[in-house]
Image (spheres, rainbow, N blue to C red):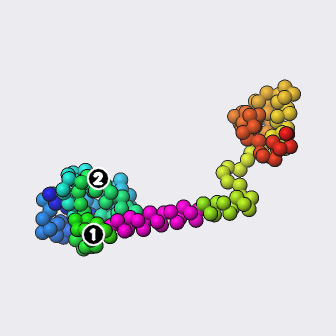
């Protein structure tokens, strides 16, 4: 069975032209909606159309921009269509037609390029983080206590002061004092001095 999907972004737009083209293309069932393509949650009829697919069906849309917002969104949606055992076709974008071997090849190439791009981004991020660490950049939340304060807290606790008193004096929470005493919040320099 051929299943059609039509979408316009604004309430004052009309999707009747898309519906006519989908009927001419042989769609027996058509899902249509007036919704922004910004989020997947907003495209309820698209979700219904994909859920309605059965093995051997073809989901058809007039243009790719009516179906997907970005390459990543397109590939994710195509995965869902494929998981249902169905194929996809965009009437105005014949290169994206998984009913043909050529269209399937191009789709796989696009998925590979998208994955390659993500790996490059991850690699650049990792390199940037490593470079920043070599330059002494600290990541995460700033420490609320420095090395000297951590040592002083340990000394005062050993002398009999309570965690509540220490937390109040240093304006931190009791769990922070506890972590200092357990050595989890003690900066490396302080541990080296204490050893």
Q: Is residue 191 above or below residue 174?
A: below
Q: Is residue 94 above or below residue 30?
A: below
The residue beneath circle 2 is: 83
Q: Disc 2 and disc 1: Cα gap in Å?
A: 17 Å
Where's residue 69, x and y in %? Answer: 36, 65
Seen at 37% across and 68% down, the residue is 109
Where's residue 186, x and y in %? Answer: 77, 42
Q: Residues within 10 Å of mark 2 (few under 14, many from 20)?
A: some
Q: Quadrant of residue 181?
A: top right
Seen at 22% across and 65% down, the residue is 99
Q: Nearer the viewer, residue 43 or 113?
A: 113
Seen at 67% across and 49% down, the residue is 141
Let me know if residue 111 is in the magenta part.
Answer: yes
Q: Which residues are magenta?
A: 107-125
- Judged from the image, the secondary structure of the residue bearing numbered disc 1 is helix
Left or right of 157: which side holds 116? left
In the rendered image, the quadrant that contains the N terminus is bottom left
Q: Is residue 186 above or below residue 113?
A: above
The residue beneath circle 1 is: 103
Q: Residues within 10 Å of mark 1 (few under 14, many from 20)?
A: some
Seen at 79% across and 33% down, the residue is 166
Q: Work out whether residue 187 can be spotted.
A: yes
């Amino acid at each position: 069975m051929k299943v059609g999907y039509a979408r316009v972004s604004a309430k004052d737009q009309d999707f009747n032209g898309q519906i006519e083209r989908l009927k001419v293309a042989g769609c027996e069932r058509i899902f249509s909606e007036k919704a922004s393509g910004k989020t997947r949650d907003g495209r309820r009829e698209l979700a219904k159309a994909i859920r309605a697919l059965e093995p051997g069906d073809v989901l058809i849309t007039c243009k790719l921009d009516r179906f997907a917002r970005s390459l990543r969104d397109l590939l994710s949606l195509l995965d869902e269509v494929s998981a249902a055992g169905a194929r996809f076709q965009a009437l105005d974008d014949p290169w994206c037609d998984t009913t043909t071997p050529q269209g399937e090849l191009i789709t796989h190439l696009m998925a590979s390029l998208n994955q390659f791009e993500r790996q490059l981004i991850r690699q650049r991020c990792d390199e940037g983080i490593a470079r920043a660490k070599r330059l002494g950049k600290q990541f995460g939340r700033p420490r609320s206590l420095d090395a000297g304060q951590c040592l002083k807290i340990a000394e005062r606790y050993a002398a009999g002061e309570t965690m509540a008193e220490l937390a109040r004096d240093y304006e931190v929470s009791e769990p922070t004092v506890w972590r200092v005493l357990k050595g989890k919040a003690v900066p490396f320099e302080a541990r080296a001095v204490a050893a």
